[in-house]
Image: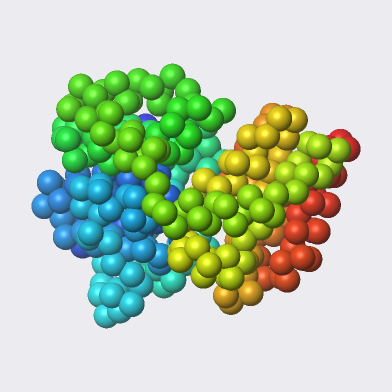
């Protein structure tokens, strides 16, 4: 994978552009929103005209991040022209969703990411598949550019790195992640406040949706795999939206003896959104890729048009095949 410090072309592109589109992946998480907003604050300090766009709204829990209100949805981009399109934390161009049209229309494109399955789809690609989070790669960018880490930037980068490392408990957590957070604390980051908001406080809708998912919990693969399901009826009963399913898959993953887990989330349009998790030596990115998705070895996802029962059967076949290897 191309590393940021090998790609000064990205910095040149940012300096030379006037109107810049920043975008991230559908169903954005903390790394997506945090990384994008950190870059947004830097570019605004540079005097750039910046638009942040995402195909889906910013999750409520992340609206406390400085600048979160600036995100617009794809219809707001109609008729606008940008000198540069910059995708962050999007493992492939399809993950940008409906913002992809504006991304393609820009005369030059760059991206910054940390997913090892990234196909390097932009004109300039700053991708490190070994980085714990895209937020880590953004921090490298800011260091390379000699930019000050302001309090606003520190909050955004903390959200990016802490959420993608499971509050520094996932396998991808490394020394760089801790070192960066130390720098963010030195910049004034209110660690206790941010940690409580991101990892302890929950909306009622999330807790009720979790209860619906737990009722579907099933173990298979000789006790080594677990799964849960959600349907539109579950969301309606819990008065929940898509953002409220975040993290639910981990309740299946964190059972004794379980090595792989998935949450199959059926949508109104017939698509099934799948979140996959694993422990070494298993690879759920391979499972996700079978259905047009991708991600990390131990955390991946996909969206696929198939009936829920058939999708679950297909997923379980792929997961069980890894158990037999």
Q: How is the image coloured?
A: rainbow
Residue shown at 16%/60% (left/top)?
A: 49
Residue shown at 58%/65% (left/top)?
A: 234
Instruction: Say if 88 sits above or below 157 in the image.
Output: below
Q: Residue 123 placed where, x, y %?
A: 42, 55
Q: Residue 210 placed where, x, y %?
A: 55, 51
* Picture quadrant of residue 10: top left
Q: Residue placed farthest to the bottom in the image?
A: 79
Q: Is residue 244 left or right of residue 190?
A: right
Q: Residue 5 placed where, x, y %?
A: 37, 32
Asked if residue 189 shows in the view, the reply is yes
* Picture quadrant of residue 194: top left
Work out which quarter of the rendered image holds the C terminus and state it.
top right
Q: Is residue 278 left or right of residue 197?
A: right
Residue shown at 29%/21% (left/top)?
A: 182
Asked if residue 289 shows in the view, the reply is no
Residue shown at 53%/30% (left/top)?
A: 170
């Amino acid at each position: 994978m191309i590393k940021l410090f090998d790609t000064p072309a990205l910095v040149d592109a940012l300096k030379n552009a006037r109107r810049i589109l920043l975008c991230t992946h559908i169903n954005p998480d903390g790394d997506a929103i945090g990384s994008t907003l950190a870059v947004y604050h830097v570019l605004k300090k540079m005097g750039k005209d910046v638009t942040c766009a995402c195909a889906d709204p910013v999750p409520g829990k992340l609206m406390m991040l400085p600048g979160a209100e600036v995100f617009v949805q794809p219809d707001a981009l109609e008729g606008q022209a940008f000198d540069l399109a910059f995708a962050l934390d999007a493992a492939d161009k399809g993950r940008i969703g409906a913002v992809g049209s504006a991304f393609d229309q820009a005369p030059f494109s760059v991206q910054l990411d940390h997913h090892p399955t990234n196909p390097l789809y932009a004109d300039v690609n700053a991708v490190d598949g070994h980085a714990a989070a895209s937020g880590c790669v953004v921090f490298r960018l800011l260091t390379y550019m000699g930019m000050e880490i302001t309090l606003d930037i520190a909050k955004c980068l903390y959200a990016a790195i802490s959420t993608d490392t499971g509050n520094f408990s996932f396998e991808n957590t490394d020394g760089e992640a801790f070192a960066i957070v130390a720098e963010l604390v030195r910049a004034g980051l209110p660690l206790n406040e941010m940690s409580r908001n991101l990892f302890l406080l929950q909306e009622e809708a999330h807790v009720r949706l979790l209860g619906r998912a737990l009722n579907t919990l099933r173990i298979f693969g000789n006790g080594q795999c677990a799964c849960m399901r959600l349907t539109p009826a579950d969301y309606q009963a819990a008065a929940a939206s898509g953002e409220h399913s975040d993290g639910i898959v981990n309740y299946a993953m964190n059972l004794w003896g379980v090595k792989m887990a998935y949450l199959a989330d059926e949508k109104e349009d017939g698509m099934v959104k799948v979140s996959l998790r694993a422990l070494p030596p298993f690879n759920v990115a391979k499972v996700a890729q079978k259905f047009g998705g991708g991600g990390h070895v131990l955390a991946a996802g996909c969206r696929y048009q198939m009936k829920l029962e058939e999708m679950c059967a297909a997923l379980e076949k792929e997961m069980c095949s890894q158990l037999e290897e």
